[in-house]
Image: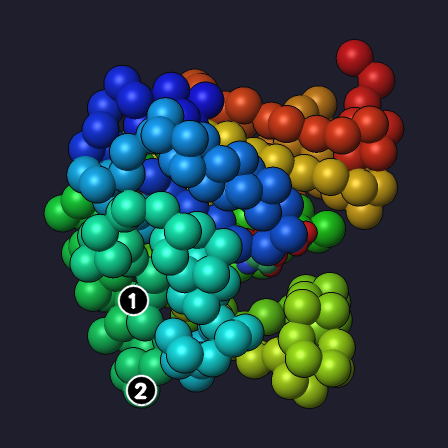
Amino acid sequence: IISAQVIMKPHCVLGLATGSSPIGTYKQLIEWYNKGDLDFARVMSINLDEYKGLSPENPQSYRYFMNTHLFHKININHANTYVPNGTEPDAEKACQAYNELLHKIGPADIQILGLGHDGHIGFNEPGTSFDSVTHMIELKESTRQDNARLFFDGKIDEVPTHAITMGISNILQAKKVLLVACGENKAQPIKVLVEGEKTTDVPASALQDHNDVVVIVDKAAASLLTK
Ligand code: GLP
């Protein structure tokens, strides 16, 4: 789906995500780029979120993740890749700047999403308003615990307490949404997203209001679906 988008519209805007879920997707795109099938020279990208306080050089930052897992391995113009600024001391200013950017270059033609075990998308934790735009959020302890595995020695103390994230309404503006979820701990939010009632307790359920969402799951993540 993503490669078709890049071929059909070489100047498309890709909404990108971090986490373990999209790593295989990025590997596949890099492989096709290396084969000469994809050209990212005119593509622009907007990422969902960034930890507050982590610089682009910090290997735990989402900017660093995107550079190493995708941007440095394809011919995208680095100046056309955007991630919220986690090091701006005035978070309000960083959020406003990102909202303005999204207005200017968005909406994304495709937004890729992973899924938190509590149903979060980007870093929009349960309870976040569906009308939200880019904002700073305090991360739930369980989210920090989950993400600790990706930090150096896997300790929760190393995971920042806050992040800047696109809001749910920014995400809903994408023309198409592609959500990838694997593993048993995603089964409950997948059930609510696909078969349940829309509720701010499960932020991903906001996607029920979008008219073009593709949900890709493995058997474990699909295990609670009944229909
Ligand atoms: C983080 C990111 C989310 C991501 C989630 C799930 O919280 N902010 O965008 O979807 O992790 O990560 P994983 O794909 O590793 O399960």
Q: Using the image, determine if residue 8 lies above or below residue 197.
A: above
Q: Position of residue 25 (x, y in %)?
A: 55, 38
Q: Is residue 172 left or right of residue 31?
A: left
Secondary-structure class at tag 1 = helix
- Residue receiving disc 1: 95
x 44%, y 68%: residue: 64
Q: Using the image, determine if residue 109 lies above or below residue 184.
A: above
Please, what is the three-letter code of the amino acid marked with disc 1?
Cys
Q: Which of pointers 2 and 1 lies earlier in the amino acid sequence?
A: 2
Q: Say few, some or many: other residues with alpha carbon within 10 Å of mark 2 (under 14 / 14 to 19 / 20 or more).
A: few
Tell me the quarter of the image containing the N terminus: top left
x 60%, y 26%: residue: 215
Residue 45 visible? The answer is yes
Do residues under tags 2 and 1 come within 8 Å of each other at their CB atoms?
no
Give the image's coloring scheme: rainbow
In which quadrant of this rendering is ligand 1 seen?
A: bottom right
Q: Say few, some or many: other residues with alpha carbon within 10 Å of mark 1 (under 14 / 14 to 19 / 20 or more).
A: many
Residue 130 visible? The answer is no
Please, what is the three-letter code of the amino acid marked with disc 2?
Pro
Q: Position of residue 112 (x, y in %)?
A: 47, 39
User: From this viewpoint, which residue is outermost toward the front?
Assistant: 35
Q: Position of residue 201 (x, y in %)?
A: 65, 48
x 47%, y 61%: residue: 68
- Residue receiving disc 2: 89
Secondary-structure class at tag 2 = loop
Q: Is residue 60 left or right of residue 75?
A: right
Q: CA distance from mark 2 to mark 1?
A: 11 Å
Residue 84's disc is: none
